[in-house]
């Protein structure tokens, strides 16, 4: 549904993605509407600059296109203002009258599409979460969006994606893979250079770390569900799951909900199924939360939680006793307008960012978890290294290995850029 309030107003001229402020309580109705956290991106619609607002959490998949003056109305919906208050604020700011019926119409559309933080949203959310928690299989979220949902079409798609690969030769006992989690369209060269190495792996367990792009309460979010793709079901390790449930530390990090619509692990699976066809493999998916508090010094890397998780997990893997590899689905720098940077993304900026990526990749080559973290902390993570947490834990678990970086790309559309790399870890000789 399109809202376009035809006033010759500047309102607030957003040119980059932003988040509408919200709080952590619910309103009971729409008399004092409160927006949920949303994503907004500038788009051109019918030769006008508009904004596409969507639910980053994926509770609703219905995006709305709104004009910039509507954005101002959304910013007033913080749960403290009535519709009449919003009308008065708008008139006070712009000197133009907006009819209360227009505001009501907007609020009702937001409510129906679950963009308001109220009882309607709360009830829907709780039902959806309960259904997901009870399901034994995590269904694909991105099929039909980021890749074909039809099995045969997906096989053709992956065959075309990997047909030009050189099929890299293994240099030893492979212990891990560093891969992107960007979409296949932008990351296909690095996926293609990296994942064929999985053909050299004959280990039954793939521990897959991925970035959680939604806030999480925990730094680890372990899923014990089987995951499905159009290519079939890839099973979670039932034996390892039992050990985790019985572990006094790790059982507290079983958290299924964040896996529901997260792409960082899902995008690894069709590629693994395609290239490792015929191999008997199981997975353990772990989404990682933010390390922001460690970056800012509010917490320290010697923190008891990190040490407790990693030591408990290593002990558990020793009890499990079977060979495994550690995969991370993790991108590197995110810079430019799409990510909130105000400076132009010129050739010099891209080169400087690539140099900084190289410093990070050197730490990965040496499988130096603390050095990797410190290098990013030294630049205050201003380039938003999206794969910070999964790569850190991958390096931590693979201490004693060595890594060869086999691919790197810095994607850009001229305004924004994402970088990512492919790496293969080997047991040190």
Image (cartoon, rainbow, N blue to C red):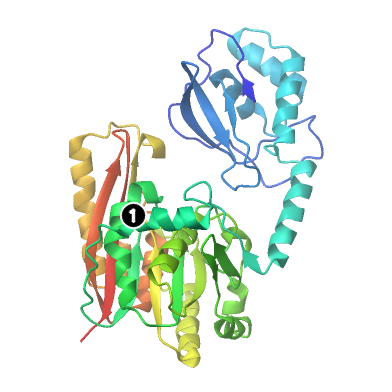
- The C terminus - image quarter: bottom left
Q: Nearer the viewer, residue 178 or 249?
A: 178
In the image, residue 162 sits, relative to residue 369, either above or below, namely above
* Secondary structure of residue under mark 1: helix
Tell me what residue is drawn at x 21 percent, y 59 percent: 359
Tell me what residue is drawn at x 20 percent, y 57 percent: 358
- The N terminus - image quarter: top right
In the image, residue 429 sits, relative to residue 254, either above or below, namely below
User: At which x and y percent is residue 144?
Assistant: 53, 48
Q: Is residue 273 left or right of residue 256?
A: left
In the image, residue 104 sits, relative to residue 240, either above or below, namely above
User: At which x and y percent is residue 328?
Assistant: 39, 66
Q: Nearer the viewer, residue 112 or 191?
A: 191
User: At which x and y percent is residue 238?
Assistant: 59, 82
Q: Nearer the viewer, residue 252 or 179?
A: 179
Q: Badge 1 local density, few (<14 within 10 Å), some, or many (20+)?
A: some
Tell me what residue is drawn at x 63 percent, y 67 percent: 137
Tell me what residue is drawn at x 76 percent, y 19 percent: 84
- Decide if residue 297 is in sight here: yes
Q: Quadrant of residue 202?
A: bottom left
Write down the residue under mark 1: 161
Q: Is residue 36 left or right of residue 8?
A: right
Q: Is residue 82 left or right of residue 10?
A: right
User: At which x and y percent is residue 95?
Assistant: 62, 7
């Amino acid at each position: 549904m399109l809202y376009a309030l035809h006033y010759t107003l500047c309102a607030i001229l957003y040119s980059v993605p932003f988040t509408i402020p919200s709080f952590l309580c619910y309103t009971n109705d729409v008399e004092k509407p409160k927006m949920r956290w949303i994503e907004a991106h500038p788009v051109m619609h019918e030769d006008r600059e508009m904004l596409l607002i969507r639910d980053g959490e994926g509770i609703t998949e219905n995006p709305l296109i709104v004009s910039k003056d509507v954005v101002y109305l959304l910013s007033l919906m913080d749960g403290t203002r009535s519709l009449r208050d919003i009308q008065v604020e708008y008139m006070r700011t712009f000197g133009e009258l907006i009819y209360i019926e227009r505001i009501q119409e907007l609020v009702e559309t937001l409510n129906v599409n679950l963009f308001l933080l109220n009882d309607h949203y709360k009830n829907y959310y709780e039902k959806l979460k309960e259904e997901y928690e009870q399901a034994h299989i995590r269904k694909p979220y991105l099929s039909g969006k980021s890749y074909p949902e039809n099995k045969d079409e997906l096989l053709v798609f992956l065959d075309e994606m990997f047909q030009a690969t050189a099929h890299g030769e293994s240099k030893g006992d492979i212990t891990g893979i560093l891969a992107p989690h960007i979409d296949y369209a932008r990351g296909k060269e690095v996926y293609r250079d990296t994942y064929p190495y999985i053909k050299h792996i004959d280990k039954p367990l793939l521990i897959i770390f991925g970035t959680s792009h939604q806030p999480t309460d925990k730094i680890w979010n372990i899923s014990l569900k089987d995951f499905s793709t159009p290519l079939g079901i890839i099973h979670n390790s039932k034996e390892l799951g039992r050990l985790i449930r019985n572990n006094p530390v790790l059982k507290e990090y079983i958290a299924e909900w964040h896996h529901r619509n997260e792409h960082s692990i899902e995008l690894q699976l069709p590629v693994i199924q395609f290239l490792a066809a015929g191999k008997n493999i199981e997975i353990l998916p772990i989404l990682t939360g933010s390390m922001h508090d460690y970056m800012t010094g509010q917490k320290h890397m010697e923190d008891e939680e990190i040490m407790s998780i990693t030591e408990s997990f290593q002990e558990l893997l020793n009890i499990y006793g079977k060979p495994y590899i550690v995969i991370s689905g993790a991108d590197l720098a995110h810079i430019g307008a799409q990510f909130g940077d105000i400076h132009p993304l010129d050739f010099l900026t891209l080169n400087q960012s690539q140099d900084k990526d190289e410093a990070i990749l050197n730490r990965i080559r040496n499988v130096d978890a603390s050095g990797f973290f410190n290098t990013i902390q030294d630049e205050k993570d201003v380039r938003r290294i999206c794969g910070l947490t999964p790569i850190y834990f991958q390096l931590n678990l693979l201490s004693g290995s060595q890594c060869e970086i086999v691919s790197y790309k810095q994607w850009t559309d001229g305004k924004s850029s994402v970088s990512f790399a492919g790496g293969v870890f080997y047991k040190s000789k």
